[in-house]
């Protein structure tokens, strides 16, 4: 018998298909941090989100003070955003052990 007949295949696919909010926020912050000043469409493509999702998450990140918008309509990570990203990475590594 295959794994698919027991339903394991669908569970495995589901585990990789959906990301939680923390993972999406980390993806957004990493994109903004490592590409410096970045436009919304670049963030959208890099984080693999649609326009509405990207707008929602960016507004949330700006409201929390993790991201700012420059005069050129590009996004930059703040010091607070960098600290948040570092702390979530440390926590993720700690959970692996």
Image (cartoon, helix red, strand yellow):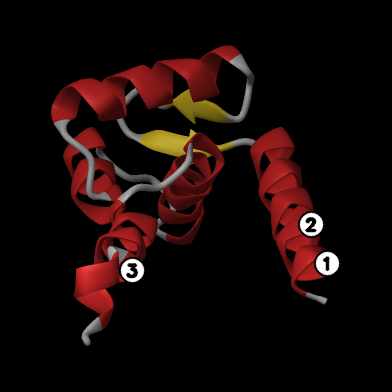
Judge left or right: residue 90 versus residue 48: right
Asked if one can make out residue 70 in the rendered structure from this viewpoint, the answer is yes
Q: Secondary structure at mark 2?
A: helix
Q: Secondary structure at mark 3?
A: helix
Mark 3 lies on residue: 8
**Residue beneath the point at 25% across and 39% down:** 39
**Residue beneath the point at 79% across and 61% down:** 90
Spatial distance from mark 2 to mark 3, Cα to Cα? 29 Å
Q: Quadrant of residue 58?
A: top left
Which one is in front, 6 or 42? Answer: 6
Mark 2 lies on residue: 91
Judge left or right: residue 14 versus residue 76: left
* Cβ atoms at labels 2 and 1 below 8 Å apart: yes
Q: Is residue 15 above or below residue 82?
A: below
Mark 1 lies on residue: 94
- Position of the C terminus by quadrant: bottom right
Q: Secondary structure at mark 1?
A: helix
């Amino acid at each position: 018998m295959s794994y698919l007949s027991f339903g394991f295949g669908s569970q495995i696919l589901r585990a990789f298909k959906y990301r939680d909010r923390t993972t999406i926020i980390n993806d957004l912050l990493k994109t903004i941090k490592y590409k410096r000043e970045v436009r919304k469409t670049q963030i959208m493509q890099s984080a693999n989100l649609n326009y509405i999702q990207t707008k929602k998450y960016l507004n949330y990140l700006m409201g929390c003070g993790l991201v700012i918008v420059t005069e050129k309509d590009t996004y930059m990570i703040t010091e607070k955003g960098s600290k948040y990203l570092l702390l979530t990475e440390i926590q993720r590594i700690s959970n692996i052990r």
